[in-house]
């Protein structure tokens, strides 16, 4: 998962709205979101290569999502898959220990983990060893720290905030359109993360297009004042065309 926009207490009917894209290599085997037969309380996709997931929620209202930190000079090959952090949290949220996560932070390449009960979310950045609570507001999380002023983060925060404040009910198609924004930032506004300029340009859009690597799925998660969860996910092929859609609704236990 490479970008999330999170609105906390910004819409009169939905205390929580999350719009998120997962960017990944197209050759990496993946199952679209579903309730896991082996863990029926968990709704998430599955990374079939490492066994974890990028974003999910359980029926008790605990959710988690991961973004990688883009810092190629720090990458290690002999570390644990970051997607397992999401899986473990969704399985054992009540027993999850922030101190344990901090103790094991160097066992993983750089990440941001969004986690918590739906009405008490936090983000942990393992490179900074920093924990941030998400109070009322709109947030953007990509491949640096929370709310890093990257052009695509600023654009997504502004778009989601305006939409939530518009007074309209939320139409998923509108949020999917926000997530399908393929506008690249001008070179003068690009972050310098240690990758080549051409790749930096490619990665500067909310929706990333490419034949080898790009946005593979978009997810809209809404939770209303009655604690009903609405989850909608679209998956995409290498031509940026939607090839499937998964929709689920359930009440938090």
Image: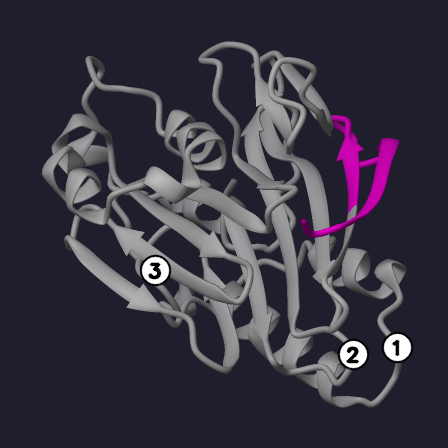
Q: Which residue: 53% across, 45% down?
A: 202
Along the line of sight, the residue nearer the viewer: 142 or 208: 142
**Is residue 52 on the magenta stretch?**
no
Q: Which type of secondary structure does the marked residue at label 1 adopt?
A: loop
Is the residue marked by circle 1 packed among few (<14), some (14-19), or many (20+) residues within 10 Å? few
Residue position marked by numbered label 3 in the rendering: 191
The residue positioned 80% from the left and 39% from the top of the image is: 234
* Location of residue 19 in the rendering, given as x and y in whole percent from the top left corner: 66, 58
Rounded to the nearest whole Å, what is the CA distance between mark 1 and mark 2? 8 Å
Crowding around mark 2 (Cα neighbors within 10 Å: few <14, some 14 to 19, many 20+) is some
Q: Earlier in the sequence, mark 3 or mark 2?
A: 2
Residue occupied by mark 1: 169
**Range of the magenta residues?**
232-253
Q: CA distance from mark 3 to mark 2?
A: 36 Å
- Residue of label 2: 13
Q: Circle 2 sits in a helix, a strand or a loop, which is it?
A: loop
Q: Which of marks 2 and 1 precedes in the sequence?
A: 2
């Amino acid at each position: 998962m490479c970008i999330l926009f999170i609105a906390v207490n910004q819409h009169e009917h939905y205390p929580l709205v999350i719009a998120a894209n997962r960017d990944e290599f197209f050759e990496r085997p993946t199952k679209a979101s579903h309730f896991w037969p082996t863990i029926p309380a968990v709704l998430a996709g599955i990374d079939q290569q490492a066994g974890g997931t990028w974003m999910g929620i359980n029926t008790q209202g605990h959710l988690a999502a991961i973004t990688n930190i883009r810092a190629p000079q720090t990458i290690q090959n002999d570390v644990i898959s970051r997607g397992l952090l999401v899986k473990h949290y969704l399985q054992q949220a009540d027993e999850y220990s922030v101190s344990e996560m901090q103790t094991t932070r160097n066992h993983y390449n750089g990440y941001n983990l969004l986690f918590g009960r739906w009405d008490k979310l936090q983000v942990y950045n393992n490179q900074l060893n920093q924990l941030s609570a998400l109070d009322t507001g709109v947030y953007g999380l990509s491949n640096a720290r929370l709310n890093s002023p990257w052009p695509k983060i600023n654009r997504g925060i502004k778009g989601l905030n305006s939409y939530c404040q518009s007074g309209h009910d939320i139409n998923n198609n509108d949020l999917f359109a926000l997530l399908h924004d393929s506008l690249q930032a001008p070179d003068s506004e690009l972050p310098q993360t240690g990758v080549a300029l051409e790749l930096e340009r490619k990665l500067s859009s909310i929706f990333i297009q490419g034949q080898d690597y790009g946005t593979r799925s978009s997810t809209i998660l809404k939770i209303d004042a009655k604690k009903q969860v609405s989850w909608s996910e679209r998956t995409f092929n290498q031509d940026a065309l939607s090839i499937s859609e998964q929709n689920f609704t359930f009440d938090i236990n």
